Amino acid sequence: MTDAARTQGRAIAFVGLGMMGLPMATRLVEAGFRVQGCDVSEPARSALAARGGLAFATPGEAAAGASILVTMLPNGGIVRDAVLGAGGAAATLGPGALVVDMSSSAPMETRALAADLAAKGLGLVDAPVSGGVRRAVDGTLAIMAGGDPALVERARPLLDAMGRSVILTGPVGSGHAVKALNNYVSAAGLAAACEAAIIAERFGVDPNVLVDVLNVSTGRNNATDVKMKPFVLSGTFASGFSMALMAKDLRTAVDLAEQLAIDAEGARGAAALWAEASAALGKAADHTEIYRFLAGRGKPE
Ligand code: NAD
């Protein structure tokens, strides 16, 4: 029997039905899994139920009878609580069950969680994603998977339903390390493109023309390609990825560098910028609003 056949029809618990989790869980429903979802938000639970999933108020209830638990939560502390805290999933998951943390969690916390779960006979794979809401809806996310390759194989039918590519990154925690580093590079690219657009406009160049030039030149990056015109220059700022979460990812990258005794000056500068912007613009801000923050800064004293 193939892995897909063994996993098809089995119950999958899915905790965290937000901007990313809801479309990802929906992909699993569409692929034929029985999705037992959980979120603290009632509207999020109703949205899953409307898409054919089953909704529960606690991770423990959602995990009953499930062989795999997927988490898509704001950070690793919340993941730990959802699994090991009061009403958590560990108490009801079946013996030998697998936890797949697809959130962007901190790698050192993930290592510690893996050890705590192993002591309970539970496996952990970290499988964070890149691609944003659009690719979550399409099921074409890039997935970076850390952990025992045999455990990643067990999760493969789910991962294939949500993503286009699964890259094995190494031991548990390595997916989360790579994800934080990816977002550092991504945030730096977006901030650079926004700054360039602000400078170009002040000089009298249409920023749309600047983006056209960047996209056929060496300055091209993901932000110039898929963010600058649709979300920044259009003024919609509706990418679906919050500034607070991006600031968290940059902090994770800096923490990792510090834990490895590396003085990562660029990452420190980026983390400070995004933390300041997040504090100034508030919880509801989209990460593409870094443009508004930079535009409002004026000339340094
Ligand atoms: P989100 O804030 O939209 O969703 C998080 C969900 O978790 C919310 O529905 C919230 O109610 C729920 N939640 C919070 N605490 C909970 C708890 N204790 N129990 C159950 N549910 C709880 O965030 P998102 O944008 O979907 O991001 C989720 C994760 O994916 C984050 O780690 C983020 O960094 C990462 N990520 C996001 C994107 C993106 O484009 N939005 C892309 C890649 C990775």
Image (cartoon, grey):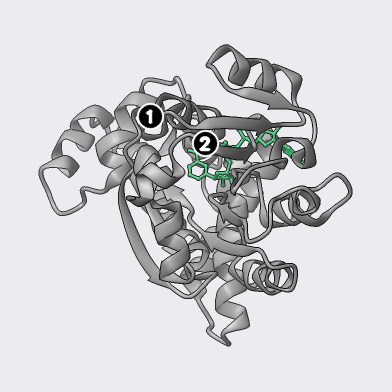
SS at mark 1? helix
Residue for point 29% across, 45% down: 222
Picture quadrant of ligand 1: top right
Residue for point 35% across, 34% down: 139
User: Residue 143 vs residue 12: left or right?
Assistant: left
Residue 248 pos. (x, y %)? 62, 53
Mark 2: amino acid: Phe
Mark 1: amino acid: Arg
As rendered, which of 44 and 88 lies closer to the eye?
88
Residue furthest to the right: 86
As rendered, which of 236 and 143 lies closer to the eye?
143
Residue for point 33% across, 25% down: 230
Tell me the residue that label 1 is attached to: 134
User: Residue 132 vs residue 201: left or right?
Assistant: right
Q: Ligand 1: does it lie within 8 Å of the C-beta at label 2?
A: yes
Quadrant in the rendering for residue 167: bottom left
Image mark for residue 241: 2
For residue 131, say whether it is visible.
Answer: no
Label tally: 2
Residue for point 44% across, 56% down: 154
Residue furthest to the front: 1
Relative to 164, does residue 104 appear above or below in the rendering?
below
SS at mark 2? loop
